[in-house]
Image (tube, coloured by chain):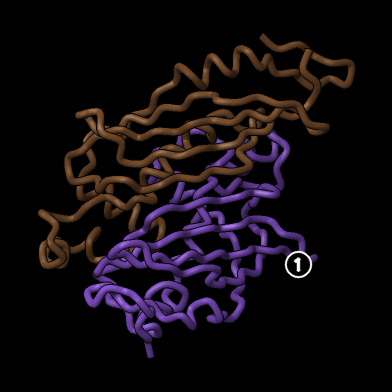
Chain colours: A purple, B brown
Amino acid sequence: MSASIPGAAPDVPDVDPRLEKLDLPPFDVEIEKGALQKFAKALGETNPIYFDEAAARAAGFRSIVAMPTFHVVPGTRDELTWGMVRQLGLDPAKILHGSQRYVAHAAVCAGDRLRGRKRVTRQYQKKALGFIETVIDYRDADGRLIVEDFCTFVVRP
Amino acid sequence: MTAATSSGTNVVDIDELVRDINSHELSSGPITRTMIAIYAGASGDYNGIHVDSDFARAAGLPDVIAHGMYSMGLLSRLCTRLAPRAELIEIAVRFQAMVELGAALTCRSQVTGRSSSPDGTLLELALSARKADGSEATAGTARLRIRGAVP
């Protein structure tokens, strides 16, 4: 399944060069009020637009607003994370989250329906570590780009 | 202070907002197993290093650790508290150090840039979550958009 990186040291973890071609099927996300509220509460958020429908509407939103890092929630579904790791023959215990970036093109609110598409954009070795960069694009029913999720994870030897 | 425009919307005083952003601090308090468990449930990330002490120890850790994404969520709160007058359009962080049980993170922001666009004012922020010893667990940047004319 995985192939050695030419020129890599013997103790370097193998990262499959076919990762760059890996394309995961699109997935649908329904933004649920309860999930938004639970997430905001877990972070100790106090701004009512993230909890309360009336407050959100008074502030000009359609409904309760998703916090900026809420998009971790659809991204943690098994087939996208551990499913992908298993497919590639990587050891989950060796994977670390290196960096994370979200770009918000529009507010996301309870009731919104989005379609997500994940792909690997880059993979490389640096010294003894493997790096895998992924992006998930979330679009609305009209195909407009709403949120982008850029992630780098690190594969330890 | 804010001023009402003829359209009735309040205009944000950017200088005051910048002072607020630069001076505001947010602390997690000591991070407990329960806080980590609640975040695991809310985020859907049940990685054993966060929810299972035996798994964490087998992976070489002293015990379970907090999610990096938890620290990113705390940093986002430096901006979400300003919504809706300021809109977070981008947030990016690097996870630099593990956050162990009992650690308390202090989150701070600093305005590093300011520009005008047709939509309003854009602020660039530096974000930092530090442990009690001053070491940086998670750090990065954010961009805020404040709509409307600047007086």
SS at mark 1 in the image? loop
Q: Position of residue A36 (x, y in %)?
A: 51, 52
Q: Chain of mark 1?
A: A
Q: Which residue is mark 1?
A: A141
Nearer to me, B14 or B125: B125
The local crowd at label 1, few if under 14, some if 14 to 19, many if 20 or more residues have their Cα within 10 Å, is few
Q: Farthest top residue?
A: B1
Residue A77, given in percent of the width and then of the height, sits at 45, 71
Residue B49 in the image: state x and y as whole percent: 22, 61
Question: Residue visible at 75% across and 26% down?
Answer: B116
Describe residue A90's horizontal placement relative to residue A114 as left or right.
left
Please report the residue visible at 49 percent of the width from the left and 24 percent of the height from the top: B110
| Quarter assignment of residue B149 | top right
Residue B123 sits in which quadrant? top right
Check the image and report above or below for A61 versus A74: above
Q: Is residue A75 above or below residue B88?
A: below
- Using the image as rendered, state which of residue B67 and residue B33 is in the foreground: B67
Which residue: 57% across, 28% down?
A: B82
* Quadrant location, the C terminus of chain B: top right
Quick one: which residue is furthest to the front in this view? A7
The total number of labels drawn is 1
- Asked if residue B125 is positioned above or below residue B45 in the image, the reply reads above
Residue B1 x, y percent position in the rendering: 66, 9
Amino acid carrying label 1: it is Ala
Q: Using residue B38 as the reference point, say whether residue A148 is left or right of it.
A: right
Foreground residue among A86 and A109:
A86
Give the farthest residue toward the right. Answer: B6
